[in-house]
Amino acid sequence: HRDLKPENLLLDSDGPGAIIKVIDFGTSQKYDPEKKMHQTYGTPYYIAPEILAGEYNEKCDVWSVGVIMYILLCGRPPFDGQTDDEILENVSKGTYKTDSAVWKNVSKEGLDLVQKMLKFDPEKRISSSEALNHPWIKNLTEGINVDENLATGALMNLKEFRAERKLQQAVCTFMVSQMATKEEMEELQKAFSSLDKNSDGKLSRDELLTGFTEIMGATAAEEEVERIMKMVDTDQNGWIDYSEFVMATLNKKNLLSDER
């Protein structure tokens, strides 16, 4: 993303179950683990020090989320200043304090996660998937309750999906983005999360195999997953990301019903 900050985080409702939406992808770039990035993007309070140094990877976003988390826990930014130049100078030093009175009300796990996300050296900084599996997250969030029939239905829709033609793929994407209800998207998010065992935001072959094995047995699942990876993994990167999953699993017949 390269410009994560509170202004780019929205809630889709004002209720307790609101889903966070990330916006403003104008500075974003497709993730390539083999390439470093060099362009300078970001906002003074939230920019990672390695961006200022001129070479960075995806962990710049982990730093930004760590800054957001720091502010949410104590009410002040970790790197402050009277001007943008002062703020950026403090960011480039990477030193911050957690010894004020307000931090006494933060648990050891919460403080530990902040410190791991704000590690100055990106190589020593926690990854996003590791952060999602940190005890502070795992122990303080509710487990995802997924209706078994819903999960099975999503997998069966995935089984029936065909994406040979680019036009069909484009039409399916448009249908999902314009016609799916909030409730349908919420249920698919739950189904995706239940299959995404390591919380990395994508479904690997092994994760799909686990889900299909529960439905059809190991032998049949092996063949089905191989076929699905060829059909649904439209960008052929070796896994099924959330957009591909939604496009493939949302029931197209329901989208085209008279009520819609």
Image: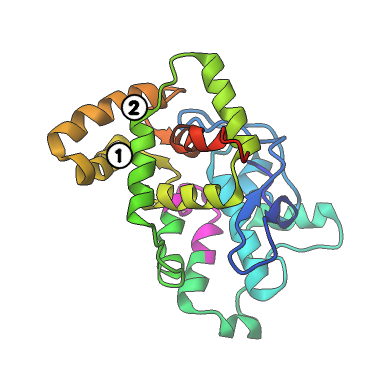
Left or right of 228? Residue 106 is: right
Q: Mark 2 and mark 1 in contact (Cβ < 8 Å)?
A: yes
Residue 255 picture quarter: top right
Q: Secondary structure at mark 1?
A: helix
Q: Is residue 118 magenta?
A: yes
Residue 200: give its label. none
Left or right of 158? Residue 78 is: right
Residue annotated with mark 1: 208
Q: Amino acid at mark 2?
A: Met
In this view, 236 is above or below 39: above
From the top left corner, tell me how far across and down residue 185 is, in percent: 54, 47
Q: Which residues are magenta?
A: 114-129
Q: Residue at x 42, y 63 (%)?
A: 134
Q: Residues within 10 Å of mark 1 (few under 14, many from 20)?
A: many
- Can residue 38 be seen by looking at this rendering? yes
Q: Earlier in the sequence, mark 1 or mark 2?
A: 1
Residue 229: give its label. 2
Report the predominant secondary structure element of the magenta stretch: loop
Position of the C terminus by quadrant: top right
Outermost residue toward the front in this view? 258
From the top left corner, tell me how far across and down residue 129 is, in percent: 43, 51
Position of the N terminus by quadrant: top right
Q: CA distance from mark 1 to mark 2?
A: 9 Å
Q: Residue at x 64, y 83 (%)?
A: 102
Task: Report how many numbered discs are placed on residues in the image.
Answer: 2
Residue 93 picture quarter: bottom right
Name the image colouring: rainbow
Q: Amino acid at mark 1?
A: Leu
| In-front residue for pair 121/228 | 228
From the top left corner, tell me how far across and down residue 96 is, in percent: 64, 67
